[in-house]
């Protein structure tokens, strides 16, 4: 009985990381990426009316110097569309080759239809089916998880995953504890089926619904529809219990690293780079010390972009693929954590 249980566990672990058709193992290889940050640069001084010495105040607490805000006429799909077109160009494929398009976002263009369908139309991906996933700041890694599983089960060959958010549209600019943290952006990755042992090697995804009240927009859906009263009370804007979320993050980040390395059969020292969700540089410093991991192995854009929610990991990934920091053969751990509560990561061989 014990031997059978162990064999079942091993089988499940293998199937979670890869699937097979006959003797062929299928992997999800990254063949292209793209990104877009809006042109409007918003420096910390923008928040001087909220807090004295805003630049020092924000930077010392978060590591952020500036962020980008979308124009009033730009929606999340607009940012995502630019990133998607860049990814198609980088991959050297036509939009008609995309089988599925997944957009991770918590700031959709509207409550319906799916933002992914708007992006699908914009890029001409007429052969794809498209849908959104919303796991707040974890949305992009969740979208990658979905894309990876679609490919590894053998049903689809080419899937685009996008992380995009425009938090400038939902921030409370009277709340100094949240509004200086966030910026807007979008990033896209195209995964394609391959028999080579590269691409997504293993994943680890979790959520804890008991923590849902910690990050929310209270008046934004069926529980508390938007009314003149909720707008007056600013309940249609982003709310976060910052201290509790910080404690949550520094608890789950080590968990992601440990579990991904365990499932991948590697040591943390085998990782060439870690791309964490870009939330707060103090979290990264804490984790670097905890694992005795070189600080420069954490790839960041937090100082220039702020917390771009679902876009953060995708933006950093694209930047470091394009500038040559991430090289063929590198092992990279991408991770997200955020509302839900949700967290997870993927180990990728480039």
Image (cartoon, rainbow, N blue to C red):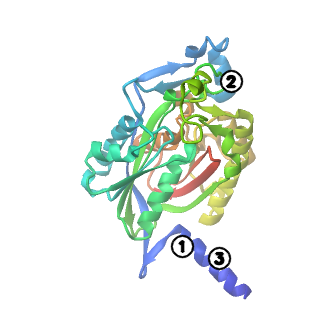
- Pick the quarter of the image with the N terminus: bottom right
Which residue does the numbered mark 1 point to in the structure image? 15
Specify which label sits upstream in the sequence, 2 or 1.
1
Q: Mark 3 and mark 2: span between their CA atoms? A: 46 Å
Question: In which image quadrant can residue 177 be found?
Answer: top right
Point out which mark residue 9 bears: 3
Residue at figure coordinates x 52%, y 39% from the top left = 312
Q: Percent position (x, y) of residue 24? A: 41, 77
Mark count: 3
Identify which residue, 96 or 66, lies in the foreground. Answer: 96
Which residue does the numbered mark 2 point to in the structure image? 60
Specify which label sits upstream in the sequence, 3 or 2.
3
Q: Percent position (x, y) of residue 144? A: 48, 54
Point out which mark residue 335 bears: none
Mark 3 and mark 2 in contact? Answer it, CB < 8 Å: no
Residue 247 shown left or right of residue 199 in the figure: right
Residue at figure coordinates x 65%, y 76% from the top left = 9
Specify which label sits upstream in the sequence, 3 or 1.
3
């Amino acid at each position: 009985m014990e031997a059978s249980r162990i064999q079942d566990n091993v089988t499940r672990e293998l199937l979670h990381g890869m699937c097979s058709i006959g003797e062929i193992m299928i992997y999800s290889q990254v063949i292209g990426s793209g990104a877009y940050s809006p042109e409007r640069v918003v420096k910390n001084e923008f928040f001087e009316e909220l807090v004295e010495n805003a630049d020092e105040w924000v930077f010392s607490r978060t590591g952020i110097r500036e962020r980008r805000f979308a124009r009033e006429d730009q929606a999340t799909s607009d940012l995502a569309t630019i990133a998607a077109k860049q990814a198609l160009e980088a991959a050297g494929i036509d939009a008609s080759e995309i089988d599925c398009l997944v957009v991770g976002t918590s700031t959709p263009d509207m409550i319906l239809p799916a933002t992914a369908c708007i992006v699908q139309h914009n890029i001409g991906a007429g052969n794809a089916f498209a849908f959104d996933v919303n796991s707040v700041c974890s949305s992009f890694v969740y979208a990658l998880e979905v894309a990876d599983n679609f490919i590894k089960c053998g049903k689809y060959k080419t899937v685009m995953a996008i992380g995009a958010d425009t938090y400038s549209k939902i921030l409370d600019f009277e709340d100094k504890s949240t509004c200086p943290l966030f910026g807007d952006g979008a990033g896209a990755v195209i995964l394609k089926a391959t028999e080579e042992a590269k691409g997504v090697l293993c994943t680890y995804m979790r959520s804890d619904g008991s923590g849902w009240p910690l990050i929310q927009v209270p008046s934004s859906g069926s529980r508390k529809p938007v009314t003149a009263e909720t707008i007056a009370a600013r309940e249609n804007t982003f709310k976060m219990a910052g201290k509790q979320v910080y404690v949550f993050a520094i608890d789950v980040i080590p968990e992601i690293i440990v579990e991904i390395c365990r499932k991948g059969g590697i040591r943390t020292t085998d990782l060439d780079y870690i791309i964490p969700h870009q939330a707060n540089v103090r979290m990264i410093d804490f984790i670097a010390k905890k694992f005795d991991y070189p600080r420069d192995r954490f790839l960041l854009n937090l100082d220039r972009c702020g917390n771009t929610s679902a876009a953060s990991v995708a933006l950093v990934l694209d930047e470091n693929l394009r500038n040559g920091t991430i090289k063929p053969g590198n092992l990279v751990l991408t991770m997200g954590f955020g509302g839900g509560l949700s967290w997870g990561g993927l180990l990728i061989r480039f």
